[in-house]
Amino acid sequence: MTAYFDDTHERISSVGDGFECATELDAIEEKLVFDCTVCAMFSDVPNKIREEVHQIVLRRGNAMLPLNAPGAVIETVQEHKQLLHDLCWDLHTTFHDLCKCGIDRLSDDPRMPLWCLYADGEGEREELVEKQKKVSS
């Protein structure tokens, strides 16, 4: 279906094994959690899916946990990578479930609703151009 989660797994796997790579892994997590959370907060997303996204982040997250949540105990870069792979896998499964709901403008790619909003904006700009052409002529 979507390459979004597959690409994220590949980015995680491509990170080196030194402790200096923690920042890169945190950036991958930040993008993944941000994209999935923004999508989950759209009003058309069923509450069950939204809550599942939040629960997965709380269970598998590290860098993107709320300040009042207990953090993960990570001792090695490999453990960090595995935690991120698990986070990505669980979110991927949840977004497949979202896709099965058949809700317009939502898919198993968490960026879809934002792309749809952007396309709406492009459409409005095109309409403005046409209106301006009519006024000018």
Image (cartoon, rainbow, N blue to C red):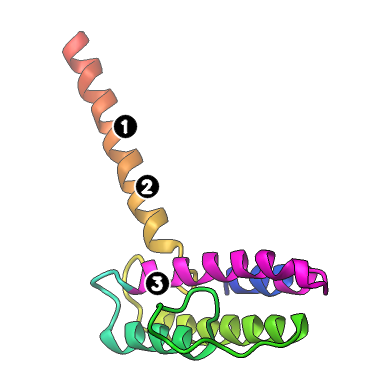
| Residue type highlighted by circle 2 | Ala
**Percent x, y for residue 78?**
77, 84
Which residue in the protein does label 1 denote?
A: 126
Left or right: where 74 falls relative to 49: right
Q: Describe the element under mark 1 as helix, strand or loop.
A: helix
Q: Tell me the mark number nearer the camera, choosing from 3 and 1.
A: 3
What is the quadrant of the C terminus in the image?
Answer: top left
Q: Describe the element under mark 3 as helix, strand or loop.
A: helix
Instruction: Tell me the magenta residue range.
Output: 12-40
| Residue type highlighted by circle 1 | Glu
Which residue in the protein does label 2 denote?
A: 119
Asked whether disc 2 touches disc 1, contact meaning CB atoms under 8 Å apart, the reply is: no
Which residue in the protein does label 3 denote?
A: 37
**Percent x, y for residue 41?**
30, 71
Q: Nearer the viewer, residue 50 or 75?
A: 75
Q: Residues within 10 Å of mark 1 (few under 14, many from 20)?
A: few
Quarter of the image holding residue 73?
Answer: bottom right
Quarter of the image holding residue 60?
Answer: bottom right
Q: Residue at x 46, y 79 (%)?
A: 65
Q: Describe the element under mark 2 as helix, strand or loop.
A: helix
Q: Tell me the mark number nearer the camera, choosing from 2 and 3.
A: 3
